[in-house]
Image (cartoon, rainbow, N blue to C red):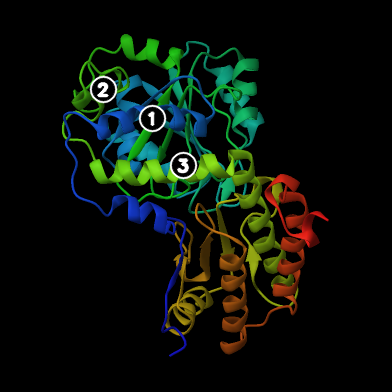
Amino acid sequence: MLSNGRPYLAIPGPSVMPDRVLNAMHRAAPNIYTGELIDMTASILPDLRAVARTDHQVAIYIVNGHGAWEAALSNVVAPGDTVLVLATGRFGHGWGEMADGLGVTVETLDFGDEQAIDLGAVEKRLAQDKDGRIKAVLAVFVDTSTGIKNDIKGLRDVMDLSGHGALLMADCIASLGCDRFEMDAWGVDVTIAASQKGLMTPPGLGFVWFNSKAAAVRAQMPRVSRYWDWTPRANPDGYWQHFDGTAPTHHLFGLRAALDMIKEEGLENVWHRHETLARAIWAACEVWGQGGPLKLNVANPVQRSHAVTSIGIGSPDGDRLRAWLEQVAGVTLGIGLGREPADAYFRIGHMGHVNAHMVLGVLACLDAGLVALDIPHGKGAVAAATQLIADGSRVAIAPAACTAKQCCG
């Protein structure tokens, strides 16, 4: 079969793990009381703040993204409090469900599966909340199920215009290290993320960044469970308090390597790489769609994520195409998550450790699958993606980083 060889995982998380990260984890367990692990963890914290573009505090949890949802909520809302959830896909609703499970009253503004948050509708709702009943606004920056990217800075602006004092909480699980995010400059009070997407580390670590406003809310909470409490994690008296027990040793070694890779490339360059590769995928999809049913889930390019692209193609061709790619070409695409019918959609993850040949390989295999399955489609999609990457490379390569004559003269 043509799939024999190294398979490629093009799902939107867990993302491709760099060999450098895997090699860093392939070692004996360290001393968890003194020595290199303690020093290395101290070096990780400022780099996590740098990736989120904040000068504020960060807590690390041994959890997945759902655990990070609960950790963030547990520190700032109590049973009976109200949160406003702004949903643009399955994970917006999921965060609301987590809050509901904690006894929090959840009010949801659902903007559907193809459009970003309507900031005017949010401003109107907050203006109606004269008594400040809403304690926090929950927004997913990029919803993995739909590929929608929301305007978090614009959301802060309308919250300020309405004079509302709610916390702004942003889920950056799918987007951190992929799409430009500026926690402090955009006025975000609480940010959450996880290790397995743009941070290129196996699933198992969750992160919560919080500013002084959120810390003040935490200080007024009647009770926070010892495990979820972010205060000792961010300001420990002893190393063990970072994790409320044994440290996730090998995940930390992997995370250290991943953060080193981001620092070496430069976060601005990381963002540019993701943008260029995402635009190449969109270019191919737009060509395919000119001669068949395939369409990008998000029509407005400004509202599309640079980390994941959701694509509709009609039932059951989404599942047929995914099966062909995995079984024949060795490429695994993401399922149609949170959309109905699910077999009419598929998703491409392009986050973290991903480059031009990976993306072009996925697109070429997709093109072959469309042909093999007799799914109508426009011709020339891979050429369109190739041209976009060629054009993007002229912008991306700085003279100091390039020694080839043909690039820099």
- For label 1, the SS is helix
Lateral position of residue 250 relative to residue 14, left or right: left
Looking at the image, is mark 2 or mark 1 earlier in the sequence? 1
Lateral position of residue 26 relative to residue 190, left or right: left
Q: Which residue is mark 1?
A: 43
Q: Is residue 313 visible?
A: no
Residue 198, compared with residue 369, is above or below; it is above
Q: Is residue 48 visible?
A: yes
Q: Which residue is mark 2?
A: 229
Pick the residue in front: 367 or 123: 367
Q: Quadrant of residue 298?
A: bottom right
Where is residue 259? Give x, y as percent: 45, 41
Cα–Cα span, label 2 and label 1: 22 Å
Residue 353, compared with residue 169, is above or below; it is below
Lateral position of residue 29 relative to residue 191, left or right: left
Cα–Cα span, label 2 and label 3: 28 Å
Residue depicted at x 33% and y 42%? 66
Looking at the image, is mark 1 or mark 3 earlier in the sequence? 1
Indicate the amino acid at tag 2. Answer: Asp
Q: Which residue is mark 3?
A: 260
Residue depicted at x 43% and y 46%? 258
Callouts 1 and 3 close, C-beta under 8 Å: no
Indicate the amino acid at tag 3. Answer: Asp
Looking at the image, is mark 2 or mark 3 earlier in the sequence? 2
Where is residue 342? Give x, y as percent: 46, 66
Q: Quadrant of the N terminus?
A: bottom left
Residue 195, compared with residue 152, is above or below; it is below
Residue depicted at x 49% and y 48%? 89
